[in-house]
Structures are given as structure tokens and as C-alpha cells.
Image: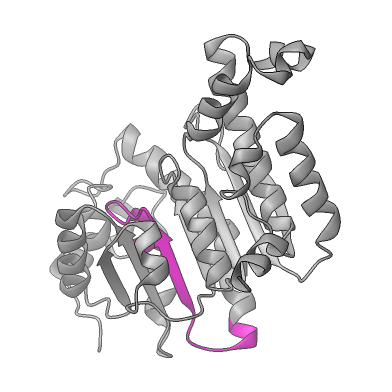
Amino acid sequence: MKRADTTADKAKPAETLAPEIRPGQSIALLQELHILTRDGKLNQDSRRKLKQVYHLYQFIEPLLKEIQQDHAAISLVDHGAGKSYLGFILYDLFFKGLNDGSRIYGIETREELVQKSTALAQKLGFPGMSFLNLSVAESTRSDKLPEQIDIVTALHACNTATDDAIDFALKKRAKFMVLVPCCQAEVATVLKKNKGKDLGKSALTEIWRHPLHTREFGSQVTNVLRCLQLEAHGYQVNVTELVGWEHSMKNELIIASYKNLPRKRPTDRLQEVLATLGLEEMGERFYTQHLAEAESTT
């Protein structure tokens, strides 16, 4: 299906647009996403959003090209898609020039956003985009998605949705994951509950004795456990900043690439961290390949 030309795409000469806009981008898309005003301008909030997505695209584009070297028809699933800023801009910058069956799937629990994104993709002539009204956990079992996915993204998926996205990616044998975690209170809750038990004699509990520290330390430990879990499944993990702190406090970017690396050391370290901090009950959440294989045989 050929992408329809739109009046908005033709209306503004390039020199009148905000300098952040890249050559060939759909002006109609950016206006529909309320990133650009009707006269082609950016406000401060829109500039911040666009900078985040552009910065993330710098990390994702090489992964897309690496997949292309292996096979055509790239599959990318974006969890907690919201208004699908990331999915639409990824499609506009990279996917719309492909004609090989490549597809982006946006997973979102709010039906009204799914309907709006579906309508917008049709309006812009973006046939390789699909939007599903599912939770991240439900999508793992859905027959509306392929059995294997190339790239999984989750940008600020709240609470345990990032963990569900990791679970999805592991079960879909994803080659790459690109994750920007959001707040997750589960680990902090367990830390708070268990700090008065056997660990109460340890000076380690001073790290999370105060409620504010419990929340901050719980967030840090959560991402450490996520990284160890990915390494325990054979992934190479890189942790970096998404953008400067002036743009977002939820700034951690985790990129995982499947390399079939040795699993024993990260598996042992994961179990050791859980035991040291009294988080053994979180073992089902941060499962390793060894545990997954054991469960599959029972």
C-alpha cells in the first residue's frame, strides 16, 4: 500500500520548520502527535519529547540494520505504547521505506489510545503498524503476535510492566531489548516487609531504613536484578543514560543483545543478591533460564 501524500506534508517549506525536524519526516504525523503546531513550531515540552525519541532512535537504528543483515521482515513490539510516539516515529524514520513485511506492534491497555493510533496509522498510510488492546502479560499468550520477535521496546512502562516486557521478550526469543524502566514498587515493598527479620542484625538494612531510601534503593536494586536476569539468559547488557537529567528523572536505558553468553556467573550472582537482601520471594519474578527450564519439565 502506497503511503498517501497529505496536504500537511506539502504545506510547509523545510526552511520554515523547526530545525529539529529531520529531512523526509512526516509533518502530518508530528502535527497529529501534537509535537509540531500547525505552523510547524515546537514548544518546550514537545522539544523534550522529540529529543528523547531521537536519542532513543540513535540506539535502535543500528539494531534494526543488524537484523536486516540477517533477514528481512523485521518485527518490533513496543510495550506500554501509550500514544505510540516511539512506534510512529520509528516507523516514519525507518520502516516506511521498507516493503518486506516488516511490522511494528504497539501494545496498550487503554482501548481509546489503541483506536486512535489505529486510525492515525490508516490516515497516514502506515500499513506496517498494528495496535493491540492487551496488557503486556496478556500479549505473551496472544495469538495476534508472531511466535518470535526481533526487537522489544518498553519506554517508561509503569510498575511491573517492564518486567512483563522482559518476560515477553525472553519467551519470544527476542534478539534485542531496549528498555527505559519506570518506577517499580514491588521490590521496595518486600525490602520494607523483610527488614525487621533476620536481616535486622545486618548494617546493610541502614541502606533502606528510611522510607525515601527504601523507594530509591528498591528502584536501583530492581534494575540490577533485571540486568542480571538478562545476563543469566545469555544477553549482553549495556546500561546508559537516555537523556540528560534536566529532561527526565527516569533516565536509565537498558539495551540487551542476545549473544548466547555463559549464564552460570550471572545466575549465581542473581541468587546471591536476592538472598543477601532478603528478596528470595522475588525469584519467580527475576527467574533465570535454569529455573525456567526446571518449570517446563514439571
Left or right of residue 268: residue 80:
left
- Residue 278 inside the magenta-drawn segment: no
Q: Quadrant of residue 65?
A: bottom right
The relative height of residue 97 versus residue 263 in the rendered view (above or below) is below
Left or right of residue 7: residue 130:
right
| Residue closest to the eye, 164 or 9 | 164
Q: Residue at x 79, y 40 (%)?
A: 272
Q: Quadrant of residue 145?
A: bottom left
| Residue closest to the eye, 258 or 98 | 258
Image coordinates for residue 56, horizontal then vertical, percent: 52, 53
Q: Residue at x 45, y 44 (%)?
A: 160
The relative height of residue 1 versus residue 255 in the rendered view (above or below) is below
Question: How many callouts does the rendering have?
Answer: 0
Q: How does the figure colour the protein chain or chains?
A: one colour
Image coordinates for residue 260, horizontal then vertical, percent: 77, 71
Image coordinates for residue 35, horizontal then vertical, percent: 28, 47
Residue that sits furthest to the front in the current view? 298
Image coordinates for residue 174, horizontal then vertical, percent: 57, 71
| Residue closest to the eye, 270 or 71 | 270
Q: Which residues are magenta?
A: 68-89
Which quarter of the image is occupied by the C terminus? bottom right
Residue 131 visible? The answer is: yes
Residue 93 visible? The answer is: no
| Residue closest to the eye, 246 or 80 | 80
Q: Residue at x 18, y 74 (%)?
A: 122
The relative height of residue 188 versus residue 64 in the rendered view (above or below) is above
Which quarter of the image is occupied by the N terminus? bottom left
Left or right of residue 290: residue 171:
left
